[in-house]
Amino acid sequence: MATTTATPHRILRDPKPGELVRIPPGGRLEVRFRRRGLGLSRWQVELRPAHLVPLEVGDHGFHFLAFRGAADDPQPLRLVRSRVDRPGSGEVRDLLVQVG
């Protein structure tokens, strides 16, 4: 009989700015944002650690695979919400991701 181990999967819904997220190497991180209003807003990754690889990118959510990075300290992940009907930056969520 084969033994399987589940891949750790962390889901964040509408994370708070500055939130610290700890995930193991090989783990998955999913970040989801609530849709608001008429759906004119889109979330984008503006900055991410190199060892956090995007698996899926959507208008209101992201799915990443984590690898061990060069540094053990938390690394910034910046997500920015913009609106298609308003130019310029909108809401910013800076998270800290620690893999290990």
Image (cartoon, rainbow, N blue to C red):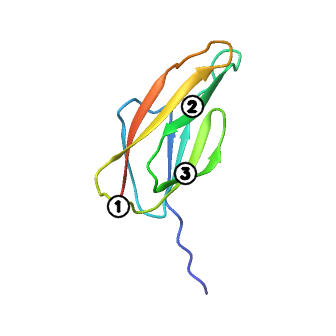
- Which residue in the rendered view is the most extreme toward the front? 88
For marks 2 and 3, give the one nearer the viewer.
Answer: 3
For marks 3 and 1, give the one nearer the viewer.
Answer: 1
Pick the residue in front: 11 or 94.
94
Left or right: residue 78 versus residue 59 is: left
Q: Position of residue 55 (x, y in %)?
A: 62, 53
- What residue is drawn where x is 41% and y is 60%? 24
Between disc 3 and disc 1, whose residue precedes? 3
- What residue is drawn where x is 57% and y is 31%? 33
Between disc 2 and disc 3, whose residue precedes? 2
- Which residue in the rendered view is the most extreme toward the right? 38
Mark 2 closeness class: few <14, some 14–19, many ≥20 residues within 10 Å: some
- What residue is drawn where x is 45% and y is 33%? 15
Pick the residue in front: 51 or 28.
51
Mark 3 closeness class: few <14, some 14–19, many ≥20 residues within 10 Å: many
Quarter of the image holding residue 43? top right
Q: Which residue does the numbered mark 2 point to in the structure image?
A: 33
Amino acid, disc 3: Phe
Q: Position of residue 85 (x, y in %)?
A: 68, 13
Q: Is residue 95 above or below residue 10?
A: above
Mark 1 closeness class: few <14, some 14–19, many ≥20 residues within 10 Å: few
Q: Position of residue 31 (x, y in %)?
A: 53, 40
Q: Which residue does the numbered mark 3 point to in the structure image?
A: 64
Q: How much space separates mark 2 and mark 3, taking CA atoms? A: 15 Å
